[in-house]
Every structure is written in structure tokens, then in C-alpha cells.
Image: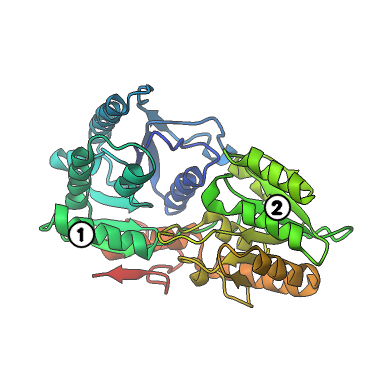
């Protein structure tokens, strides 16, 4: 019997078919479920327009959240949308509900009250803390109540990093002490079929590429400063858009750095945007709460690009220093420049590291690995793990 899966995302900041990393995450988990033979339908509050050809037939049920400038009213609208999504999922009666954690969504609990099913809660960030610190959170009690409901109803909670898992464990102890959910660390992955090895363009100065939203916490300003300090000629390509784009262009002009600005591209066009590059960079600045599992680092590796990245958070577990890339101290443009210079001056060494990076991604970090690790504790489903991927070293159980 075919397993029927409802994938749920009630976060109004994330379109299912968008250019954000979170959108890629949703699409790839849907593909991983389908690869296991499941029938998947998505329930969300935003659909988006960048529909990949292979997901054109994916049923996506949308309950939009009313827009408005009043934060309190918007939070109420989010809760109302979540309630409608819960009713739709309950009526569909799937075998599995796989939900991306969103503020104010108690959908897992609401569905499970009336419909027996397996439940997966995927947590990619400490959203309550994020919202309180960086945005506006009016009804913090309501957000924590929804989180407690989700933790109580989840068979497994898959967290993108150990810091996120620690946050979940802490909140569970306070908000749902009787729930004792199974909490796992399942870092991000990459589609090594969608992103293939690129061929460096060595007809001129080597290309150094960055992919991501141009926001302060990506550290792209340090990359521009590094380009100004380079002792070996290389060209800088930025793929993405965002609120600091104008400042980066001003900074480049101040330092006499020439930028190739590609702009934001949908996930399907990322491989083309990486083509011709020799080195890829993840220049995260110093931070006390780097809890991310950066998609870009996995995608760079799948493209057979050596990664120069900040030694911060979970990155050293993905980038093997001196083997698949080079790690540098965060917020250190001089060290960043020296590492990029080293690879730009020795393209053969850069390509060897890139090949090792792709091999590492293929063997350890596919989305099939991610889903298999998530499902391992609960023994889902009718089709066995197709590649025997469960229980890989990346799976870390949190007591």
C-alpha cells in the first residue's frame, strides 16, 4: 500500500516554490519522500511561482495569511490559517504528517486528536527566540503553547543542528515535561543529481562565487574586503539579492573591487550560476548563536567546488579543512583573502579538493540520507530505506 504523506509549512515567510533555502529544503524533502514511493501533498500558507518541472504535478493546498502592518493581528491570522490547514489535513487522513516548525502552528496535535498517523516535526531554527530578538513577538505565550502542543504530538523531532536540538530539549523540559519526544540532529543535505560538478573557467582570472541572500549575517562584506586584500588575481561573483546589496556595491566601489552581480535565481538555476567557478565561499561573521546548517555549503560541495568557509557552528563537520576546503576564523578578511589566494594560485589543488567535496556530499549528505535519518527511530514506512541509509554517522540522538 502506498504511503500518503502530508507535508505542512504554516510559515508565511516561506513559499513552497521560492528561491530561499527554506523553499529548497521543502522541495527536496518532498522529492525524498517521493523517491521512497510515497504520495505527497503539501499544505502551506504560501505557494510561490518558481515551480520546478519535476514538481509541477505536486498538489499544494494553500491557506493564505492575511497581510497587515499590525503584528498582533498578523499573529492571529497565522493561528487562523494554521487551524484551517489542520482541518484540511485531518480531512485528507494521511498516513504521515511531516511539518516544518512554524510559530503559532499546533497542526500536528490537532490532526492527531482525531486521526491516527505518524508525525514528524522538523525544526530549523529557534523561532520563538528569533522572533522575539529580531522582529516583533506580541503573543509569546501563544507561540510557546503551540510549540508545546507540537512537541507533545510529534513521534520524532528532527533538528537541523545540535544548537537547535538543545533549544528544543530545553523548551520541551519546560513546556511539555511529560512529552519526552525523540529529538534527532539531521543536518541539511543536497541533491547531487540536480547540482552536478562544474567546470572551472580558467581562461582568465579564476572565479570565486558566493550564493545566498544578501543579508548581514552572511558576511559578504568581509568577502568584498577580502577581494580588496587579494594578492592573487580572482574575480568575485555574487549570486543572490537582499537588503545589503546596495551597501555591498558601495563597499566594492570604495575598495576598487569589481563585482559580478547575478541577482537572485530559483533553485533550478543555481547549478548554472555556479558554472565556471573555481572556489566557493561561506564567509559567516563571528556570532554567538550560529545554529544554521547552511545549504550553500552542501551545494558548493556537490558542484565539486572547494569551500572556503568560516570556522563557526556546524561548518567544520561539513567542510574537512585541507581536504574538501579551507576553514578560516570568522570576521577576518585577511585570513579569508589568504585562503582564497591559496586556491586561486593552485587550480589543480582546488579541483582535487572540489572532487573530494563532491564525493563527500554524494556518500553522506543526500536528502535521502536526511529523510532516512529522520525516519530511522520510527520505522516508517511500507518501502524500506532504498539505499540502507539510516543510521549514518551524521545521525546524533539527543537524550
Residue drawn at 75 percent across, 62 percent down = 229
Asked which quadrant contains residue 84, the reply is top left
Image quadrant containing the C terminus = bottom left
| Tag 2 residue | 274
Residue drawn at 51 percent across, 71 percent down = 316
Would you place residue 16 above or below residue 33 in this image? above
Q: Secondary structure at mark 2?
A: helix
- Evaluate whether residue 3 shows in this view: no
User: Which of the two discs, 1 and 2, labels the residue nearer the N terminus?
Assistant: 1
Would you place residue 34 above or below residue 331 in this image? above
Real-space CA distance between mark 1 and mark 2, rounded to the nearest whole angstrom: 40 Å
Residue drawn at 63 percent across, 77 percent down = 323
The image's mark for residue 220 is: none
Would you place residue 147 above or below residue 209 in this image? above
Asked which quadrant contains residue 174, the reply is bottom left
Residue 143: x, y in percent?
A: 23, 41
Q: Secondary structure at mark 1?
A: loop
- Whether residue 246 sits left or right of residue 179 in the image: it is right
Residue 219: x, y in percent?
A: 58, 54
| Tag 1 residue | 181
In front: 233, or 254?
A: 254
- Whether residue 220 sits left or right of residue 156 in the image: it is right
Amino acid at each position: 500500500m502506498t504511503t500518503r504523506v502530508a507535508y505542512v509549512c504554516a510559515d508565511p515567510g516561506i513559499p513552497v516554490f521560492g528561491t530561499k533555502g527554506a523553499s529548497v529544503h521543502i522541495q527536496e524533502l518532498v522529492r525524498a519522500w517521493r523517491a521512497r514511493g510515497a504520495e505527497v501533498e503539501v499544505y502551506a500558507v504560501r505557494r510561490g511561482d518558481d515551480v520546478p518541472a519535476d514538481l509541477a504535478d505536486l498538489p499544494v493546498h494553500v491557506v493564505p495569511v492575511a497581510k497587515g502592518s499590525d503584528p498582533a493581528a498578523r499573529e492571529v491570522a497565522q493561528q487562523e490559517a494554521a487551524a484551517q490547514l489542520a482541518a484540511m489535513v485531518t480531512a485528507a487522513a494521511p498516513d504521515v504528517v511531516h511539518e516544518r516548525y512554524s510559530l503559532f502552528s499546533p497542526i500536528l496535535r490537532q490532526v492527531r486528536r482525531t486521526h491516527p498517523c505518524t508525525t514528524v516535526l522538523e525544526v530549523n531554527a529557534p523561532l520563538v527566540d528569533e522572533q522575539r530578538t529580531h522582529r516583533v513577538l506580541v503573543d509569546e505565550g501563544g507561540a510557546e503553547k503551540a510549540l508545546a502542543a507540537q512537541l507533545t504530538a510529534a513521534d520524532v523531532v528532527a533538528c537541523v543542528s545540535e544548537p537547535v536540538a538543545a533549544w528544543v530539549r530545553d523548551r520541551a523540559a519546560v513546556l511539555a515535561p511529560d512529552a519526552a519526544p525523540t529529538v534527532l540532529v539531521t543536518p541539511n543535505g543536497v541533491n547531487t543529481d540536480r547540482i552536478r560538478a562544474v567546470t572551472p573557467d580558467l581562461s582568465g582570472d579564476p572565479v570565486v562565487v558566493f550564493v545566498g541572500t544578501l543579508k548581514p549575517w552572511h558576511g559578504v562584506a568581509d568577502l568584498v574586503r577580502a577581494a580588496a586584500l587579494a594578492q592573487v588575481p580572482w574575480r568575485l561573483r555574487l549570486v543572490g539579492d537582499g537588503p545589503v546589496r546596495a551597501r555591498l556595491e558601495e563597499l566594492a566601489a570604495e575598495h576598487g573591487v569589481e563585482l559580478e552581480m547575478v541577482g537572485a535565481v530559483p533553485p533550478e538555476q543555481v547549478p548554472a550560476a555556479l558554472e565556471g567557478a573555481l572556489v566557493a565561499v561561506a564567509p559567516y561573521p563571528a556570532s554567538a548563536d550560529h545554529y544554521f546548517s547552511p545549504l550553500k555549503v552542501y551545494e558548493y560541495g556537490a558542484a565539486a567546488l572547494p569551500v572556503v568557509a568560516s570556522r563557526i557552528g556546524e561548518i567544520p563537520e561539513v567542510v574537512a579543512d585541507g581536504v574538501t576546503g579551507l576553514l578560516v576564523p570568522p570576521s577576518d578578511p585577511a585570513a579569508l583573502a589568504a585562503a582564497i589566494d591559496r586556491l586561486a594560485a593552485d587550480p589543480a589543488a582546488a579541483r582535487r579538493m572540489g572532487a573530494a567535496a563532491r564525493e563527500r556530499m554524494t556518500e553522506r549528505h543526500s536528502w535521502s540520507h536526511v529523510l532516512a535519518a529522520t525516519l530511522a527511530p520510527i520505522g516508517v514506512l511500507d518501502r524500506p530505506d532504498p539505499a540502507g541509509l539510516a543510521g549514518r554517522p551524521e545521525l546524533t540522538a539527543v537524550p
